[in-house]
Image (tube, rainbow, N blue to C red):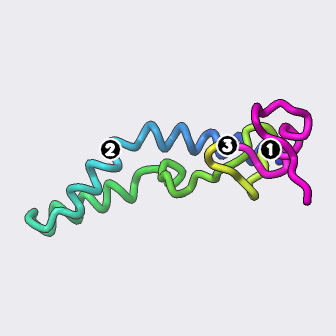
């Protein structure tokens, strides 16, 4: 199990990312628009820098839904490799069986 504080911090980052997604995207569009005056673009960069850092989607860490483990993560299932293996071994994932050769 991962630390609860790490899992909660990541959940907070997800919420902040959703909250500021529209504003961040509009400011980035203004900042990238080369047809605008440099002063306008600079102001957009300044406003973008004032947004909370944890609101950026790049700061979100993929974590297992069951254990909170950050590594060995399967995006499609939102589980870590260890949790996936345990669920498959107990037969809780339909059609998945443990393989050995």
Gap in angstroms between the C-alphas marked 3 and 2: 28 Å
Name the residue tied to disc 1. Answer: 84
Q: Which numbered circle lies on residue 62?
A: none
Work out whether mark 3 precedes mark 1 in sequence or the reverse, and give the earlier one: 3
Q: Is residue 1 visible?
A: no
Describe residue 2's horizontal placement relative to residue 52 as left or right.
right
Q: Which numbered circle lies on residue 78?
A: 3
Name the residue tied to disc 2. Answer: 23
In percent of width and height, residue 41 lies at 20, 63
Does the magenta-highlighted stretch encompass residue 48? no
**Which residue appears at 31% of the width and 60% of the height?**
46
Describe residue 67's horizontal placement relative to residue 54 as left or right.
right
Q: Which portion, as a residue range, is magenta?
A: 79-101
**Is 80 or 22 nearer to us in this picture?**
80
Q: Is residue 19 visible?
A: yes
In percent of width and height, residue 30 lies at 20, 56
Gap in angstroms between the C-alphas marked 2 and 1: 37 Å
Does the magenta-highlighted stretch encompass residue 88? yes
């Amino acid at each position: 199990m991962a630390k609860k504080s790490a899992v909660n911090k990541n959940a907070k980052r997800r919420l902040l990312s959703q909250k500021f997604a529209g504003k961040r995207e509009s400011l980035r569009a203004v900042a990238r628009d080369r047809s605008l005056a440099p002063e306008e673009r600079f102001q957009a960069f300044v406003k973008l820098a004032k947004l909370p850092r944890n609101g950026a989607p790049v700061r979100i860490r993929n974590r297992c839904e069951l254990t909170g483990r950050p590594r060995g993560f399967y995006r499609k299932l939102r589980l870590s490799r260890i949790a996936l293996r345990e669920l498959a071994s107990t037969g809780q994932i339909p059609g998945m069986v443990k393989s050995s050769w």
